[in-house]
Image (cartoon, rainbow, N blue to C red):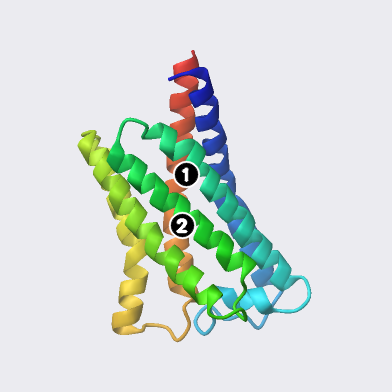
Amino acid sequence: MSGKTSNLQRIGAASGIAAPMLAFACMLLAIWSYPPFSWTDNALSDLGIVPGATGPLFNFGLYTSGFLVFNFAVFGLLSYFRSSWVGKTGSVAFAAAGLALMGIGFFPENVVPAHYLFSVAFFLLLPISLLIITGAFAFRRQAKITLLTLLIAAAAALPWILYFYIHYVPGVAIPEFVSALAGSIWTVFLAFKMNKAALQSRS
């Protein structure tokens, strides 16, 4: 790995670690600032149209973390999978998920149909990109991380599958949170792995 590639990979890794931290910090602060919010009856995006500090805080967390996810995919994943066309395909899909997350923040719930389209795109692209990346790890014969990525992809998709088939809650905040949390766990894990590989290549 060249020095330039190593540096880009470390930038991507740092973005991957920062993105979930920022997103969930802003989300939880927005929930704390708006006591009427209900995990069972609301969508997380309902927070984005609340007056005062709640809406801007929530939306800031979305479009800023979306930008960081995009950086993680472009600077990190694409260089990490530089010799794998399957990995590159998954990286591009993950970058598109980051752009969709930015769109959710830039176009709050009252901007129709843009908000809905970006939301659907994000929650579709997240598990799809992870499934593609699962294939990339499988081709590398990395059994443990292949299984982990597959399980995370399932965890990102399952809350939505159950929601549409069972409709276990009136609102979508819970499937949104669980799906995003699953993707975030994988992102942080791979970011640390990516950063370690970049440091080892320079030593």
Local secondary structure at mark 1: helix
Q: Quadrant of the N terminus?
A: top left
**Other residues around mark 2 within 10 Å, as few (<14) / some (14–19) / many (≥20):** many
Q: Amino acid at mark 2?
A: Ala
From the image, tell me which residue sits under label 2: 97
**As rendered, which of 36 and 180 lies closer to the eye?**
180
Q: Is residue 120 above or below residue 75?
A: below
**Other residues around mark 1 within 10 Å, as few (<14) / some (14–19) / many (≥20):** many
Q: Is residue 200 above or below residue 154?
A: above
The answer to whether residue 36 is left or right of residue 69 is right
Asked if the residue at tag 1 contacts the one at tag 2, i.e. Cβ–Cβ closer than 8 Å, the answer is yes
From the image, tell me which residue sits under label 1: 73
Query: Which residue extends farthest right?
Result: 52
Residue at the spot 35% in from the left edge and 47% down from the top edge: 90
Residue 150 appears in the picture as rendered: yes
Residue at the spot 47% in from the left edge and 44% down from the top edge: 73
Query: Mark 2 or mark 1: which comes first in sequence?
Result: 1
The answer to whether residue 29 is left or right of residue 5 is right
